[in-house]
Amino acid sequence: MKILVVEDDVETAEYLRRGLKEAGHAVDVAANGRDGLFMAAGEAYDVLVIDRMLPGLDGLGIVRTIREAGVKTPVLMLTTMSGVNERVRGLEAGADDYLAKPFAFAELAARLNALARRPPIAASSALAVADLQLDLVKRVATRAGRRLDLQPREFMLLEYLMRNAGRIVTRTMLLENVWEYHFDPKTSVVETHISRLRGKLDVDGLPPLLHTVRGFGYVLRAPDPTDPAAA
């Protein structure tokens, strides 16, 4: 694998560089956030290892920026901070996994291998459900010809729902595939984003597309007023 390590602590960076190279990987190292962002956005890597606290631009800022730019490279974030809230912040920013310092190198290597094995998202330039259109290249969503003002996470949520149009998706499925959570964050992050997205989709008297299937999850589908399964 080709791996970028963004770490300002010289000893930690050298430890990771040496260990990953001994494991057969190609490794680049950036010592600050701005250089890390430039390299992550401009080079093709299999996995990014990004420290949470960095000079110039912190790890959250790097991840948010590359995700907004459409860079989907898996990210493992390193941190000395503990607690669920800190992990939630990183995952919401777009990180794929979190590892607390100090860590065992064997665990870090295993997590990187797991991230690299994840299948890529199927290639597609546009999605459509009824009068809802999603341009994945321009990152633009429209309904009935009107552009929707979506935040990056709302766009990701809508993309996942449209790829699974007509199928019920559960809260757990959304946490894993949109937020990359592999634990329950014990927050209403899914419900909040669903509510905001629904408010942007179902306006000006247009028939609803995003439905709650009580006790199961959510479904995005073309209007069907005869179906009582959703509300």
Image (tube, rainbow, N blue to C red):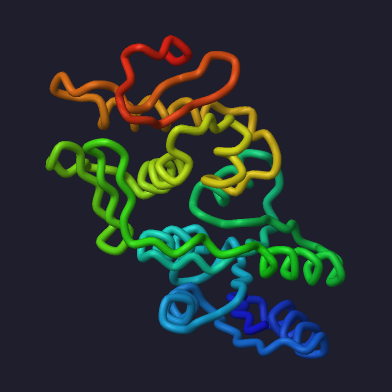
Q: Is residue 86 visible?
A: no
| Whole-percent x, y for residue 61 in the image | 44, 61
Q: Identify the image quadrant of the C terminus.
A: top left
Drawn side of residue 84 relative to residue 19, left or right: left
In the displayed structure, would residue 229 be above or below residue 17?
Answer: above
In the displayed structure, would residue 109 be above or below residue 171?
Answer: below
| Whole-percent x, y for residue 69 in the image | 36, 65
| Whole-percent x, y for residue 142 in the image | 20, 44
Drawn side of residue 131 relative to residue 153, left or right: left
The residue at 34%/32% (across/down) is 197
Drawn side of residue 185 relative to residue 22, left or right: left
- Please tell me in which quadrant of the rendered image residue 79 appears: bottom right
In the displayed structure, would residue 198 be above or below residue 131?
Answer: above
The residue at 59%/21% (across/down) is 216
The residue at 40%/14% (across/down) is 227
- Please tell me in which quadrant of the rendered image residue 183 appears: top right
The residue at 37%/59% (across/down) is 68
Q: Identify the image quadrant of the N terminus.
A: bottom right
- Please tell me in which quadrant of the rendered image residue 22 appears: bottom right
Q: In front: 136, or 94?
A: 136
